[in-house]
Amino acid sequence: MTLALGPDPIRRQKQRTWRSAALSIAAGVAGVLALCASAQQGNPPALDAQAQSQAIIRHLNSVIQFYRTVHEPVQKAGEPNDVVYRDQAVAQGSQIAGFAFQSAKAEAAVLSGQNPQAAAPQSTDQQRLQASQARAEQRITDLRQRLAVLDRQIAAAPARKLEELQTQRNQLQAALDLSMAMKDALEKITTFSRGAAGKGLVADVERLQQSIPELQGNDNKTSYPQITTVEWALSSGVVTQSSVLIDLAESRHTLQTLLDQNEKLRQQVLGLRTPMVAILRGLIATGQQLSDDAAPPAQDNGAPAEAPPVAPADLKSITTRFKSVSAATVPLSQEMIVLDQSRANLSAWQSSLTNEYGRILNALMLRILVIALALAVIFGGGELWTRATTRYIRDMRRRRQFLIIRRIIVGFLSVLVVVFGFFTQFHSLATFAGLITAGIAVGLQTILLSVAAYFFIIGRYGIKVGDRITIASVTGEVIEVGLVRFYVMELAGSSNELNPTGRVAVFSNAVLFQPTTPLYKQVPGTGYSWHELIVKLSDTAEYKTVCGEILKIIESVYHEYRPAVLRQHQAVQNWMQTNIAAPEIESRLQFTKGTFQFWARFPVEIHEADATDEKITHALLDLMAANPAFKAAVAAPPTIQSAVRG
């Protein structure tokens, strides 16, 4: 359901407002008539000064709160005609505050007359300040009059007296300036001392009124920001409509708060007016009684009855008190009328906001539904594309190309739908981009870390396809390096022989930044590793002869591929720009666990390591078969193993 926003709703709103005001005035007139009709004899009741003063201060605080809330920017989005409600609410808030302070001042005067101790007398210092200020004002008046007379004399004076008169005028002008400065200083001191030293209800009312300078006659009108129109929001994206919807919800809440404050003020006004009305009834009853006593009815013989003397001062005092009490009661009645008008205006404003909220909500739900349907069509078409490609294209390379094209098209169309569905203005797009960036930084920190690690992986000491690495207890060869992850073909087997297991291990690039997961790889540019040969010897063996024979076998095998290893070593030295010891055969005779053993360490090409170990094994077996002394010197079968796993 939509709200027509032409001149008719405004006219109907004004009619409802004036109707409410008329009813309130009629109720006030009826109350006065009933007051006069129900007036009885008796003395006017006295007010509880302390309780009434507290009620007045509470009411003024509530009025100030209501005034401040009304003057705040209540609505940020809506129809242009909502400005009428806002301006009317602001004007009525000012009227309510004005009537409240007018009534409070008058009632404070009534309470001061009833209880003289409630009025705070002025101190001696304040009296002196006021007297000094009066003298300063009188001196300023006298100096101005003397200056006016002197100006006339200067205008008609001859040339010989002109200089003397001009000197006198300058002296008078200096004296006038000094008096003006003294007056300004005295006014500031008087104002400050009155606010600081004032006590009692009158002073409290003055201080509260000073907290609203706008009520002191200043025309400082508040400039409100221009509201966002509903028609513009209806044609905007999801982000703008959501923002407008939130603004309307906040505006509705603020208006409900204003309505609650309005009702609270109304109850407070009723509470303040009730004892004042009782006093007026008592004064009316007393005045009628005195009037009847002053003019008694005629006797049976037609002669007027003798009337008791009535002091004119009694009727005069009653009249004076009636005027003072009515001066406090009438503004309360006026405030009640304005409160009723304000409530009608706020209710109409709230109804308008409710209709606007419903329109924006319906438009937002419809736009979200359209976006969801568009995305469903796109993803459904992508799924059909995938199935058709898998079914009709047999070539794996071409199938992959078609699937990549499908992914690009689906992603592009999805981004278009999201962008044009969510954003219609650049500033909303920038806001959403900021939110997305923050979400990416928090929610996708692992992916961002992987992308950052990619640049380390492809760096100087990084990994590339074909490298043999060991990471997280997995040894294998790198088969692909991606932007966020790399793939390793797993190798397993004995310490000397590693073969593919048929599995591919996938690691995130961010694993490089994990301190508990080290990564091992060959030195860049090298393809050799180290193997060890261990031969246990008997106690009767000729150690030098046996060790020499074993070294000859290792050297003969190593001599076949030694040039390739040295070339790799030289390339690494040139690349790293540093000296590295050349890979050579190392050997030593050890005494371990009560036995002698010969240990030899030699380089092997990684991809030919198995063949190299096999050659050494066959050479040792041939030597043991041909030389019984060598066989007797070997206490246990030799062991060939990798010095480093992987």
Image: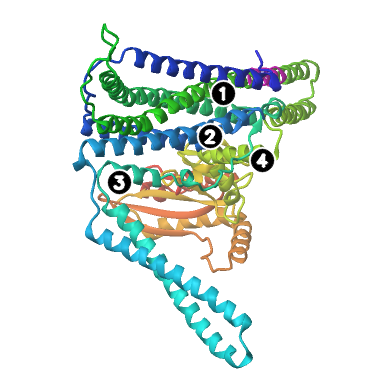
Expressed as whole percent of the image width and height from the top left, the position of residue 611 reads 57, 43
Residue that badge 4 annotates: 427
Select label 2 or label 1 by which is in front: 2
Residue placed at 53% from the left, 30% from the top? 89
Q: Quadrant of residue 148?
A: bottom right
Residue that badge 2 annotates: 90
Give the mark count.
4
Q: Tell me the quarter of the image containing the N terminus.
A: top right
Q: Find residue 203 and name its label.
A: 3
Residue placed at 25% from the left, 53% from the top? 122
Placement of 599 over or under 315, stated as above or below: below
Residues at marks 2 and 1, CA–CA distance in whole angstroms = 13 Å
Q: Nearer the viewer, residue 151 or 589?
A: 151
Select label 3 or label 4 by which is in front: 3
Residue 85 covered by magenta stretch: no
Q: Residue furthest left?
A: 117
Q: Nearer the viewer, residue 129 or 602?
A: 129
Placement of 283 over or under 534, stated as above or below: above
